[in-house]
Image: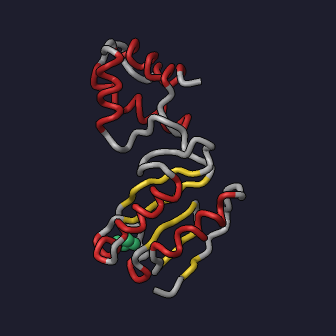
Amino acid sequence: MHNQIFEKYTKADKSSLIPLLQEVQAIYGYLPEDALTDVSEYVKLPLSRVYGVATFYNQFRMSPLGENVIRVCRGTACHVKNSSNLLFALEDALNIKAGETTRDKKFTIELVNCIGACSIAPVITVNDDYFGRITTKDIPSIVKKYAGKTKTNGVTVTEEAV
Ligand code: FES
């Protein structure tokens, strides 16, 4: 599936590495191993180098996203309202670290910069749903809400009392 994107780039041109990785990720949502091998062969860079670049930039994902993507805002407004505690609570609840996906592929945790909802900081989103002014006490119920669900498309804003 990804081989047709190579035609746009000159073979053995190392400067194509990052654009190629971006295009592969746009197709799959992450960088599958076989695609990295193909990129490595196309740009004529060792696979270890391609991996090195892919893991250096946090724009690249090495595994597919979970069914539910939880984004924890680490912008200034959320940071001063202890968003890092929300992250720790989520990591504990799901037994993964930021950037990882649970084994059952239900959840991925990502860190993001300001998501434009500073007035309800600290904020996390789950898929398209916003949860503002939450504390660590709210994390279990938020996780539970999505644990048995597939992705929601509607946007809701939930404000919890501090
Ligand atoms: S800093 Fe978190 S929403 Fe703006």
Indicate the position of residue 30 as horizontal and vertical percent values: 49, 36
Q: Is residue 90 left or right of residue 73?
A: right
> Which is nearer the eye, 142 or 45?
142
Image quadrant containing the C terminus: bottom left
Q: Quadrant for ligand 1?
A: bottom left
Give the number of marks.
0
Image height check: is 100 above or below 63?
below
**Image quadrant of residue 155?**
bottom right
Q: Residue at x 46, y 57 (%)?
A: 92
Indicate the position of residue 68 as horizontal and vertical percent values: 60, 54
Image quadrant containing the N terminus: top right
**Image quadrant of residue 64?**
top right
> Which is nearer the eye, 139 or 153?
139
Indicate the position of residue 132 as horizontal and vertical percent values: 48, 77
Q: Residue at x 40, y 78 (%)?
A: 121
**Image quadrant of residue 84?**
bottom left
Q: Residue at x 58, y 47 (%)?
A: 66
> Which is nearer the eye, 21 or 7?
21
Indicate the position of residue 103 as horizontal and vertical percent values: 58, 41
